[in-house]
Amino acid sequence: MGLRSEVESMMKRANVRRRIAAHPLRSPASSPPPTDVNWGGKVHGGNVMHWIDEAATLCGTKWTATECISVYAGGVRFYRPMQIGDLVELEARLLHTGEHTMHISIHVSSGDLTNL
């Protein structure tokens, strides 16, 4: 089984009611700045991936109380575009810890501010 399949399998089996995952790290909801969007008003996927990396780093650093780095990011799926003016929230959950590794799941959600 490849690393990607292994991580996806672990994410499916993760019990989010466990103590570790029960207290996710959430970012303050914010709206993407105009510099993060393309000419059509949609947020660039690379910017979203940067936010995901930052959320994973914060979650890992909070857990270990030391510096952490990202080595692998997999299973990224974009379901719909984010528009300029959308409210964006990232939620990081620690799924697994090993001697030198952590598996962290990041969920990104967004919505139109006018439909709240």
Image: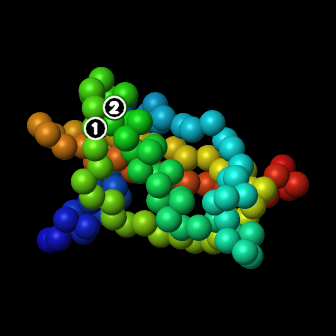
Residue projecting furthest to the front: 35
> Who is closer to the viewer here, 115 or 55?
55
Observer-nearest of 76 and 44: 44
Which residue is under mark 1? 68
Q: Picture quarter containing residue 57?
A: top left
Pointers 1 and 2 in contact (C-beta within 8 Å): yes
Which kind of residue does numbered mark 1 sit on?
Answer: Cys
In the image, farthest residue toward the bottom: 40
Which residue occupies the foreground of this view, 37 or 2?
37
**Three-letter amino acid code of the residue under disc 2:** Thr
In the rendered view, tell whether residue 94 sits above or below residue 113: above
Residue at label 2? 61
Horizontal arrangement in the rendering, residue 15 relative to residue 88 (left or right): left
Residue at (72, 58) in percent of width and height: 34
Q: Is residue 67 left or right of residue 34?
A: left
- Residue 56, compared with residue 107, is above or below; it is above
Residue at 39% of width from left, 44% of height from top? 56
